[in-house]
């Protein structure tokens, strides 16, 4: 049968206490230190990762701000280019209209000048023809000068 003795229980309890203390000193404390050290390293890595994430977020904000600024600058440059192009277009159109008016006025003046030259030449030729015809019909040259003056006067009144 089983024999239970006081000393046997006492030494078993004593052995358990010694093992508990030994395990606590040589096993649990170093493991707790290793776990604490690993936790600190993990916390440090997590803190660095959070810091890098914050920096990345800040860089994204800066990038988006610069992108928005570049977009507004692009719109402003395009607007200025359009305004400049419109101004140049208006200037070119105005210059073209002015040139066309100048050419038109010059052409009208030349046409009027040629018309007056043609009319004057025609009057002179008609007067010469009439004078020659009158001279042949009448036969005298002195009368031709008088007739020429009369004919010029007649053509002047008829031209009006």
Image (cartoon, rainbow, N blue to C red):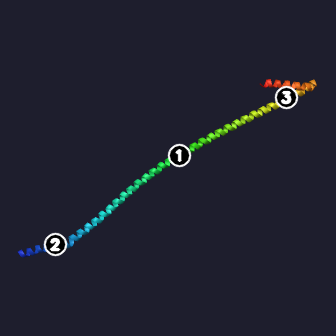
Question: What residue does disc 1 label?
Answer: 80
Q: Of the two numbered discs 3 and 2 on the same chain, state the one appearing first in sequence.
A: 2
Q: Of the two numbered discs 1 and 2 on the same chain, state the one appearing first in sequence.
A: 2
Question: What residue does disc 2 label?
Answer: 21
Q: Of the two numbered discs 1 and 3 on the same chain, state the one appearing first in sequence.
A: 1
Give the image location of residue 30, x and y in percent.
Answer: 23, 71
Question: What residue does disc 3 label?
Answer: 126
Indicate the secondary structure of the residue bearing disc 3. Answer: helix
Q: Pointer 1 and pointer 2: residues touching (CB < 8 Å)?
A: no
> Disc 3 versus disc 2: distance between alpha carbons?
152 Å
Q: Check the image and report above or below for 138 versus 15.
A: above
Displayed quadrant of residue 16: bottom left
| Residue in view at x 11 percent, y 73 percent | 13
Give the image location of residue 31, x and y in percent.
Answer: 23, 70
Displayed quadrant of residue 35: bottom left
- Residue at the extreme right: 139
On the rendered image, what quadrant is the C terminus found in?
top right
Left-right relation of 142 to 33 = right
On the rendered image, what quadrant is the N terminus found in?
bottom left
């Amino acid at each position: 049968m089983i024999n239970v003795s006081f000393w046997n229980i006492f030494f078993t309890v004593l052995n358990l206490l010694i093992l508990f203390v030994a395990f606590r000193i040589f096993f649990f404390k170093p493991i707790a230190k290793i776990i604490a050290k690993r936790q600190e390293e993990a916390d440090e890595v997590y803190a660095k990762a959070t810091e890098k994430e914050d920096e990345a977020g800040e860089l994204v904000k800066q990038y988006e701000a610069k992108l928005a600024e570049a977009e507004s600058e692009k719109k402003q440059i395009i607007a200025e280019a359009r305004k400049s192009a419109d101004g140049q277009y208006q200037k070119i159109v105005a210059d073209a209209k002015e040139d066309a008016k100048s050419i038109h006025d010059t052409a009208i003046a030349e046409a009027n000048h040629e018309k007056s030259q043609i009319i004057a030449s025609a009057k002179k030729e008609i007067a010469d023809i009439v004078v020659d015809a009158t001279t042949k019909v009448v036969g005298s040259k002195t009368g031709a000068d008088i007739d020429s003056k009369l004919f010029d006067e007649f053509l002047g009144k008829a031209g009006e």
